[in-house]
Image (cartoon, helix red, strand yellow):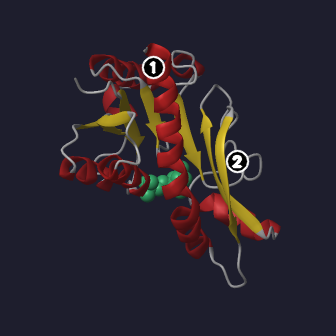
Amino acid sequence: MAEKKARIAVLVSGGGTNLQAILDACEKGIITSGEVVLVISNREGAYALERAKTAGVPGLTLTRKACGGQQAFEAAILKALEDAEIDLIVLAGFLAILSENFTARYPRRIVNIHPSLIPSFCGAGFYGLKVHEAALARGVKVTGATVHFVNEIPDGGEIIAQKAVEILPGDTPEILQKRVMEQAEWILLPNAVEQVCGEIIGTEK
Ligand code: GRF
């Protein structure tokens, strides 16, 4: 009989390189305790949906606008997660805010990747290139990425894993973003997903 795997939903808004890292890790056997069974995008036409399709994973677009507001948007996501019997939600470049009403339903079952060493350059307003712009403006010499559980505080949940990345002379936000992804995010996130999935199936055995 096949081993039980945690059922993972990945929530995205954009290019989905972190989603790709998770899909590749499943393919390569780096993630063995979980499988991606659903991808939800809050942006029409996000390239991440193409990646899901290529991997044979069902993709769904749910926008706040089409749903008619935040409450209905969250209700639609919750319904999709429940229908797919999701054990773990991975926010991988998901730019929509989820309320406490949502996060409280999945304690230690939602993880997020943030492209800095929390508690630096995190919280409301720090997303995408803004994070790297802020790190360069402050003149720090080391930055990195953090995977953490999601609770009601933006970027405030328990830290699962971190990896440091050097800032080099001449870095632009774009160059730094690419280095943080290559050297930290794409390694850290799949490993953290495997760790949490292991804990989920371990506790359910
Ligand atoms: C990544 O830098 C991630 O840390 C942040 O948003 C970006 C998403 O990139 N939360 P991608 O869509 O995974 O390529």
Foreground pick, 20 / 95: 20
Q: Which residue is under mark 2? A: 122
The quarter of the picture where the C terminus appears is top left
Q: Which residue is under mark 1? A: 71
Locate residue 173 relative to residue 102 in the image: left or right: right
**Which residue is drawn at the image coordinates 63% and 77% (left, top)?**
172
- Find residue 83 and report its image quarter: top left
- Residue type beneath disc 1: Gln
**Which residue is drawn at the image coordinates 44% and 53% (left, top)?**
18
Cα separation, mark 2 vs mark 1, equals 25 Å
**Which residue is drawn at the image coordinates 54% and 42% (left, top)?**
192
Foreground pick, 5 / 42: 5
Give residue 173's position: percent from left, percent from top. 62, 71
Q: Tell me if residue 136 comes above or below residue 105 in the rendering.
A: below
The quarter of the picture where the N terminus appears is top left
Give residue 73's position: percent from left, percent from top. 39, 26
Give residue 123's position: percent from left, percent from top. 69, 42
Locate residue 147 relative to residue 121 in the image: left or right: left
- Find residue 159 and report its image quarter: top right
Q: Tell me if residue 37 comes above or below residue 145 in the rendering.
A: above
Task: Answer few, some or many: residues within 10 Å of disc 2's Cα (few below 14, many 20 plus, some between 14 and 19).
Answer: some
Extreme residue toward the bottom, this view: 170
Secondary-structure class at tag 2: loop
Locate residue 8 relative to residue 58 in the image: left or right: right
